[in-house]
Amino acid sequence: MTTGTRSPGTTEPHSQLLPVVSVLGAVLSVQFGAAFASTLFDTVGAGGAVFLRLTIAALILGVLVRPRWRRWTRSQRQGMLALGVALAVMNSAFYEAVARLPLGTAVTIEFLGPLTLAALLSRRLRDGVWVLAALAGVVLLGLRENSGGESLDLVGVAFALTAGAAWAGYIIAGSNLAAKVPSADGLAGASIVAAVLTIPLGVVSGGSELFDPRILAVGAGVALLSSVIPYSLELRALRVMSKKVFAVLIALEPAAATLAGVIVLGQLLGMQSLAAIALVVTAGVGSVLSSRSRPDRVN
């Protein structure tokens, strides 16, 4: 895909197909990666798991990309740092949420971040309505299907909301960096920044278990599924896709997370929880459909 030879007013019928496929592939990859990561929690904790994921991903990207940061401008370096901070906060908070909530539930709550961002970027009343519909779905998640059911862990909910806010920050920072650095150098640098920021929590949480060969092998798989593959696909898509459309295209994240939770972790959710997740997904899809008429490219 080339972006430099297209005139500003030109539109290509299938120009958005590859970015859309890339984002959807990233959706499935990151959620199944998260499911496998949660199998490490009993051994190295959530902090250790996120440290392994980000550190191994940073090593892989550093070797493959070999970024040349000496040629970067100050603005490019600031963009890399911003994305690195967003990655560290988003992943750390998300793993802490998954340690306390079912995967599908955690992602559904987290999804409020990018959906709210989409509405703010749109500034249209009907997009605000979609956010309210998604919020209703999240509230429905907190209402158990019977009075004897176990309520949601409030600390887990708080971590999921924090991850959602950082997710919105990741979209903004990733889009800005992709526009400034037309290569994978930015992702490699941001991944290294994120890995460094998670060292203290990772070491305290995982300890010597972080060097266990089996743990390292699982961590490498998680790094590929949850970081290297999806972030590469997403940043490539963000070069030609608006932040708003990207934010709402990932409306399938809660559904993908629920599927991964069932297949990998055996987390079966009740009908009320599934209905709540469906409501959030519907809100995301509705926001996508209502935003098609006003493209907002990132160049």
Image: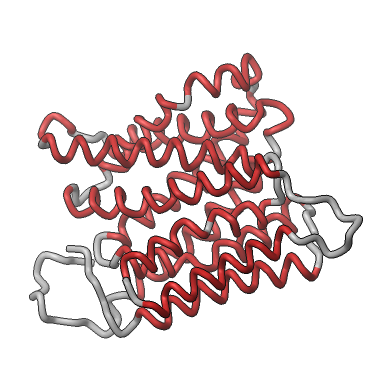
Which color scheme does this rendered protein use? secondary structure
Front in this rendered view, residue 140 or 199: 140
Front in this rendered view, residue 258 or 157: 157
In which quarter of the view is residue 136 placed? bottom right
Q: On the rendered image, what quadrant is the N terminus found in?
A: bottom left
Front in this rendered view, residue 99 or 215: 99
Residue 133, image x, y percentages: 56, 73
Residue 185, image x, y percentages: 25, 41
- Looking at the image, the residue that sits furthest to the right is 148
Q: Could you tell me which residue is drawn at 13 percent across and 29 percent down?
A: 70
Residue 218, image x, y percentages: 62, 36
- When the figure is inspected, residue 146 is found, relative to residue 16, above or below; the finding is above
Q: Could you tell me which residue is drawn at 25 percent across and 60 percent down?
A: 239
Q: On the rendered image, what quadrant is the C terminus found in?
A: bottom left
Q: Is residue 205 left or right of residue 285?
A: right
In which quarter of the view is residue 50 placed? top right
- Looking at the image, the residue that sits furthest to the top is 208
Give the number of callouts: 0
Q: Could you tell me which residue is drawn at 35 percent across and 37 percent down?
A: 84
- When the figure is inspected, residue 221 is found, relative to residue 276, above or below; the finding is above
Q: Is residue 291 left or right of residue 28?
A: left
Q: Is residue 118 left or right of residue 285?
A: left
Residue 292, image x, y percentages: 34, 82
- When the figure is inspected, residue 216 is found, relative to residue 162, above or below; the finding is above
